[in-house]
Image: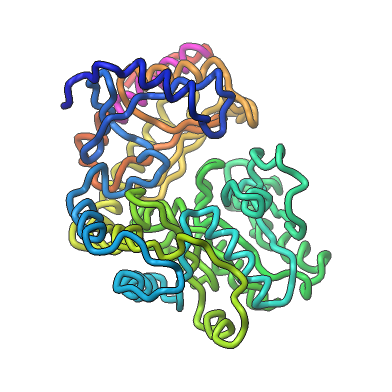
Amino acid sequence: MPDPHPDTHDIIQANRDHTLFSWSVQTQTNPIHMTGGKGSHFFDGDGNAWLDFSSQLININVGHQHPAVLDAIKAQVDTMCFAGPSFATDVRAQLGQKLREVTGLGKSFFTLGGSEANENAMKMARLYTGRDKIITRYRSYHGATMGSMTASGDPRRWPVEPGVPGIVRAFDPYCYRCSFGKTPDSCGRECVSHIEEIIQMEGPHTIAAIMVEGITGSNGLLVPPDDYYPKLRALCDKYGILLIDDEVMSGFGRTGTWLATQHYGIKPDIVTCAKGLTSGYMPLGAVVVSDAIADYFETHFLAGGLTYSGHPVSLAAAVANLKVYEDEGLFEHTRELGAYLGQRLEAMKARYACVGDVRYKGLFSVIELVRDKATKEPLAPFNGTSPEMGRLAAHLKSRHVYAYSRFNFLWVCPPLVVTREELDEGLAAYEEALALVDEMIGSPVAAD
């Protein structure tokens, strides 16, 4: 535990005075002065240790300050800090080979984050197919650049619309709130079949790709039925449409496998990744394409580039980070602890009146909060908040548990290095918060 920082309040004010914070009205920001971290915790300027139950932005997969990744960064800085994107480097070859191995695809194009990866994936799909349209989903989030933001269904796209042309949206595999009024027992996978109708109405010859998150992240963590991806893959193959798999949040161990779609036995044509690629230690994203797409660009111009594409320090961090996953058995740990987490979440769903649904895969999970289990009325409005959600968030902060909450969702996404004891500690704070919400909506916690 560090000592309190003597100037923490001045530093917070200087941040507010001189910098802009993302996705916020500036007068409503109240940032934590973060001074360091270790494993599943980070430290603030007042000397407190916070249990990081959202892995920052669901990206610090190997935990804070992992020595193997730090050593790789330091060694690369000592060797060579920068090489332009047209140069060959050792780490560029190493990471490219590793991404081919773990994804089963072909070559990689490096970016500095997920937004740029998705932007370039759409560009490559259009160049390769000669078609313009991209089908995405309404509850998706693909990034904050103009193209990736337009591709998102997330309401954060509204201020930048109309955005870029050619985006067509479909509904999601949201079993708890099925857009087609079905239940898993009565469902005919209309969440896929209606996409075929969209393809036919838009014209198959105009559609370059369908872009989906492996498991939807920022808009409710929607875990699809087991046959969703095989059916979607077959639909793409039927019409010669590429499948772009956005694994920026759900990839690299978060669900217990390299890619979330690997749980469903399918291979995309393009995978985009970032976040868990370096566990956030350095900015890096990647577009990994099939051999067929890679072969196309052997003889056709790839119209894309970035000054920091293939930055050697970022690539070194990624190579070391991927090695940590394997050396420390973090995927197996994630699957084992994820099964325990699933049991705890199901128990919360049974016990608390405000818990309408829980969804989970590995250490990627969410609690969906409602006012009434029968009507499924959300605890907070779409694209809004409520006093109950505010009290829940305030209680978790008072316990120094850092959690991601949005609309009527509360995520449980600790670092993959989290221990069972740390998981229990955080979930105990969650249960206290859920009990407070039950009191507010007039439904006291059921007796054990």
* Whole-percent x, y for residue 130 in the image: 72, 76
Left or right, residue 30 beside residue 252? right
Residue 129 occupies quadrant: bottom right
Magenta span contains residue 437: yes
The part of the chain drawn in magenta is 426-440
Q: Horizontally, is 191 left or right of 244 in the view?
A: right
Find residue 30 and report its image quarter.
top left
Q: How is the image coloured?
A: rainbow
Residue 163 shows in this picture: yes
Name which residue lies at 21% across and 59% down. 78
Instruction: Count the marks.
Output: 0
Q: Is residue 196 left or right of residue 411?
A: right
| Residue 440 x, y percent position in the rendering | 50, 12
Depth order, front residue of 155/21: 21
Residue 155: x and y in percent read 66, 38
In the drawing, does residue 151 fall left or right of residue 366? Answer: right
Residue 379 part of the magenta segment: no
Q: Look at the picture and state if 232 lies above or below 15.
A: below
Q: Residue at x 38, y 38 (%)?
A: 56
The residue at the point 74 percent across, 57 percent down is 168
Residue 261 percent across, percent down from the top left: 47, 63
* Quarter that holds the N terminus: top left
Picture quarter with the C terminus: top left
Q: Which residue appears at 35% of the width and 71% of the height? A: 92
Residue 256, placed above or below residue 442: below
Residue 229 occupies quadrant: bottom right
- Main SS class of the magenta portion in the image: helix
Kindly tell me whether residue 332 is visible in this rendering.
no
**Of 311 and 388, which appears nearest the observer?**
311
